[in-house]
């Protein structure tokens, strides 16, 4: 790794921050209905869609109606996607004549894509047709991301409004998310990817013979369009088995840079959208700074771990950076930054072998997902999660100073705090329960690819990924079986629904309250609150998971340093 890695990281984060500020302000204008530069082109499309589907853009919803619309939309999307996979052998755009997907894998995939997880237990190159990729997977990449964004805007509205039980219109927010935000960005990124060598075609697979005389099948397909939205929507499903390590998905250093930027852009911009809609931009800066602080700490630890390499080799006099499983075309720094970004944003894409990470790097990745992925988190869900942590932080501060908790001009009552605790901690508890089931189940244990603590890390990573709606996994863990397909399906649904529906319940309660003058002695826009918020996220995550992490990545790290292998 070159000596200017620190400059590269700082430059990247600076560019991300500038773009996040600009795009956050743009999204605020979109969701409050103000005119933007794209309005002359996109407003007619928006109005046409309202007319086509019979939506009244001026009609608003209570949180229960909002939640019902969200649940119905998810359910219908899952049924359609499941049916497409089961019928793909009879449908067009299937040049390789691929059969239907096995029912448990199809169910797992349907649940995965409607929950913005994009967990894939199979090799998509040999399992799904072009039509399934386009009409099923790529479409859900847009829809599931827009659903999370819609719920986040509803929660923001709750802090803006007073004495009102209405939080906005799900269908309006869904439409605006797609038309004004996801589609334009995906179109631009798709064109850039194609210009760099990413494929976008409907050609049959290429059958070639290698120089060794062996047959090789090179997958083709409409990849660029899906790759763009998988990053922008923090989805992450791979068009190719090698995901973003495949030269057709990620052909150049420029595409690698843009893909990392794409997965961070909208989650990093949403705090600024929050500040703009709240008409208090300092609050947005505070949330963004807490997210960035946690991201930088994790990234620093991951870079340090990979740069120091394997202690077993160091003891033999081989001083090296850990290059196992790294993207050799782009360098180890790009692989580490990509891994940190993909686990922090619920994207799940990868340009490196996650199984080959050093134990402390894998610990950072598991931590990013296990805490609910709020650094910066998935589209919408990341902002929701950090706001819930902010409420919890203010509640703890209120206990210490003897004051009723309040945040962003709204009093917090036991109902809001109960929903907050459910949203933040129930998925964490369920992660541990599901991990325990896997460890005590014959199929769960036999699917482990590596013995010892690394095998434990494989299971911990899998369920942190499923409940965090991330979708990545250690490759050595065999997840394409009935046990993991069904348990991760339940995990993905619970991880998504618990967070979103609890957030809507909180939004419905807070929207009814009046806005009070901010008189707290602990202002939420202060540097002190930023550190308290980041500390609450870190400490609560560590306290919840430290015992099982000791049995996995931490124990593996200690064994490696002692010279013990498995």
Image (cartoon, helix red, strand yellow):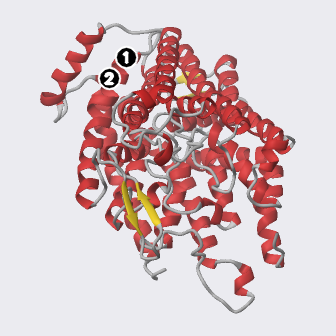
Q: Is residue 153 left or right of residue 472?
A: left
> What residue is drawn where x is 77% and y is 35%?
429
Observer able to see residue 304: yes
Q: Position of residue 539 (x, y in %)?
A: 72, 48
Quadrant of residue 488 in the image?
top right
- For disc 2, the marked residue is 175
Q: Outermost residue, right direction?
A: 440
CB atoms of marks 1 and 2 within 8 Å? yes
Q: Outermost residue, bottom direction?
A: 317
- For disc 1, the marked residue is 171
Q: Residues within 10 Å of mark 2 (few under 14, many from 20)?
A: many
- Looking at the rendered structure, the secondary structure element under dot 2 is helix
> What residue is drawn where x is 66% and y is 52%?
366
Observer able to see residue 376: no
In depth, the one of 310 and 377 nearer the eye is 310
Q: Is residue 364 left or right of residue 551?
A: left
Quadrant of residue 257 in the image?
bottom left
Q: Position of residue 487 (x, y in %)?
A: 71, 33
Q: Is residue 209 left or right of residue 405?
A: left
In depth, the one of 552 and 152 nearer the eye is 552
- Distance of mark 1 from mark 2, alpha carbons? 6 Å
Name the disc covering residue 560, or none. none
């Amino acid at each position: 790794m070159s000596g200017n890695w620190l400059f590269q990281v700082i430059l990247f984060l600076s560019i991300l921050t500038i773009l996040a500020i600009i795009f956050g302000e743009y999204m605020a204008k979109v969701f409050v209905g103000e005119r933007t530069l794209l309005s002359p082109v996109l407003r007619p499309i928006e109005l046409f869609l309202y007319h086509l589907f019979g939506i009244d853009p001026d009609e608003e919803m209570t949180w229960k109606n909002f939640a019902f619309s969200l649940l119905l939309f998810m359910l219908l999307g899952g049924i359609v996607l499941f049916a497409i996979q089961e019928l793909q052998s009879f449908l067009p755009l299937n040049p390789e004549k691929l059969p239907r997907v096995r029912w448990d894998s199809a169910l797992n995939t349907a649940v995965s894509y409607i929950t913005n997880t994009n967990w894939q237990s199979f090799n998509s190159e040999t399992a799904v047709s072009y039509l399934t990729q386009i009409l099923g997977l790529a479409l859900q990449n847009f829809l599931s991301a827009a659903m999370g964004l819609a719920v986040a805007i509803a929660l923001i509205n709750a802090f803006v409004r007073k004495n009102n039980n209405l939080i906005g219109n799900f269908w309006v927010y869904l439409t605006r998310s797609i038309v004004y935000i996801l589609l334009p960005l995906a179109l631009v990124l798709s064109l850039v990817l194609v210009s760099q060598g990413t494929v976008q075609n409907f050609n049959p697979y290429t059958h070639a013979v290698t120089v060794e005389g062996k047959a090789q099948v090179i997958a083709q397909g409409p990849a660029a369009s899906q790759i763009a939205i998988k990053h922008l929507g923090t989805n992450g499903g791979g068009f190719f088995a090698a995901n973003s390590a495949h030269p057709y998905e990620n052909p150049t250093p420029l595409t690698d840079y843009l893909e990392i930027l794409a997965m961070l852009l909208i989650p990093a911009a949403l705090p600024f959208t929050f500040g703009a809609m709240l008409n208090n931009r300092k609050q947005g800066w505070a949330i963004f700074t807490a997210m960035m602080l946690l991201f930088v700490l994790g990234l620093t630890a991951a870079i340090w771990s990979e740069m120091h390499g394997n202690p077993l080799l160091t003891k033999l006099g081989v001083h090296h950076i850990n290059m196992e499983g790294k993207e050799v075309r782009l360098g180890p720094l790009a692989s580490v930054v990509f891994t940190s970004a993909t686990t922090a944003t619920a994207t799940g894409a990868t340009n490196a072998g996650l199984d080959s990470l050093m134990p402390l790097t894998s610990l950072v990745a598991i931590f990013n997902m296990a805490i609910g992925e709020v650094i910066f988190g998935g589209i919408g869900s990341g902002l929701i999660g950090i706001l819930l942590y902010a409420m919890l932080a203010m509640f703890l501060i209120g206990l210490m100073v003897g004051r009723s908790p309040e945040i962003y001009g709204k009093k917090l009552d036991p109902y809001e705090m109960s929903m907050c605790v459910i949203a933040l901690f129930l998925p964490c508890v369920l992660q541990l329960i599901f991990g325990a089931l896997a460890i005590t189940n014959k199929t769960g244990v036999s699917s482990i690819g590596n013995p010892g603590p690394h095998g434990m890390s494989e299971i911990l990573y899998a369920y942190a990924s499923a409940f965090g709606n991330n979708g990545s996994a250690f490759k050595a863990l065999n997840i394409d079986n009935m046990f993991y397909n069904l348990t991760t399906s339940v995990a993905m649904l619970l991880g998504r629904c618990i967070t979103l529906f609890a957030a809507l319940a909180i939004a419905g309660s807070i929207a009814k309250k009046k806005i009070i003058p901010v008189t707290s002695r602990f202002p939420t826009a202060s540097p002190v609150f930023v550190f308290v918020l980041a500390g609450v996220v870190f400490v609560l995550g560590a306290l919840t998971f430290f015992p099982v992490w000791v049995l996995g990545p931490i124990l593996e790290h200690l064994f490696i340093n002692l010279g013990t292998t498995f």
